[in-house]
């Protein structure tokens, strides 16, 4: 079983009241609600980091060698299509 630690946080009273209300509605303790919220926040942050990495990979601009290969493939495909009897 994982060990637990206690922590104290400060927040505005209005937010504290909302936390209490939501915990009661969900039938969980305040501590459990905070754990759930932090876990969700971490998951969303990890997902955002992953999405940023994926976007960065797809924003990769082809270098001159890649462009030469691409253009050569394009020419070959055009030649092949011209030889086809439709």
Image: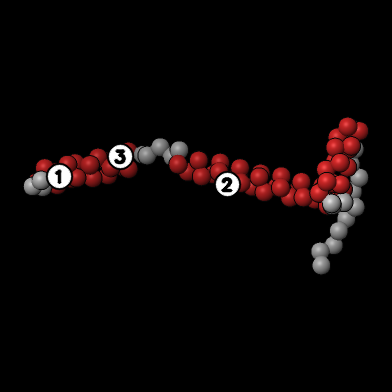
**Quadrant of the image occupied by residue 81:** top left
Q: Which of 71 and 23 is in front in this view?
A: 23
Q: Which of the two discs, 2 and 3, labels the residue nearer the N terminus?
A: 2
Q: Where is residue 67 in the image (x, y as percent from the top left)?
A: 30, 39
Q: What residue would you read off at disc 1?
A: 81
Mark 1, other Cα within 10 Å: few <14 / some 14–19 / many ≥20: few
> Reading the chain from its start, which is encountered first: label 2 or label 1?
2
Of 84 and 15, which appears nearest the observer? 15
Residue occupied by mark 3 = 67
Give the spatial CA distance, label 3 vs label 1: 21 Å
- Percent coordinates x, y for residue 84 in the rendering: 10, 47
Q: Is mark 3 on a helix, strand or loop?
A: helix
Q: Which residue is the site of mark 2?
A: 50
Residue 57: x %, y % from top left: 47, 43
In the shown orientation, is residue 85 left or right of residue 27? left
Q: Nearer the viewer, residue 43 or 62?
A: 43
Q: Is mark 1 on a helix, strand or loop?
A: helix
């Amino acid at each position: 079983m994982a060990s637990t630690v206690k922590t104290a946080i400060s927040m505005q009273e209005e937010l504290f009241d909302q936390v209490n209300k939501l915990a009661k509605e969900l039938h969980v303790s305040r501590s459990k609600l905070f754990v759930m919220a932090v876990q969700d926040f971490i998951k969303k942050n990890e997902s955002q980091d992953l999405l940023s990495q994926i976007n960065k990979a797809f924003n990769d601009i082809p270098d001159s060698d890649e462009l030469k290969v691409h253009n050569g493939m394009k020419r070959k495909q055009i030649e092949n299509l011209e030889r086809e009897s439709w």
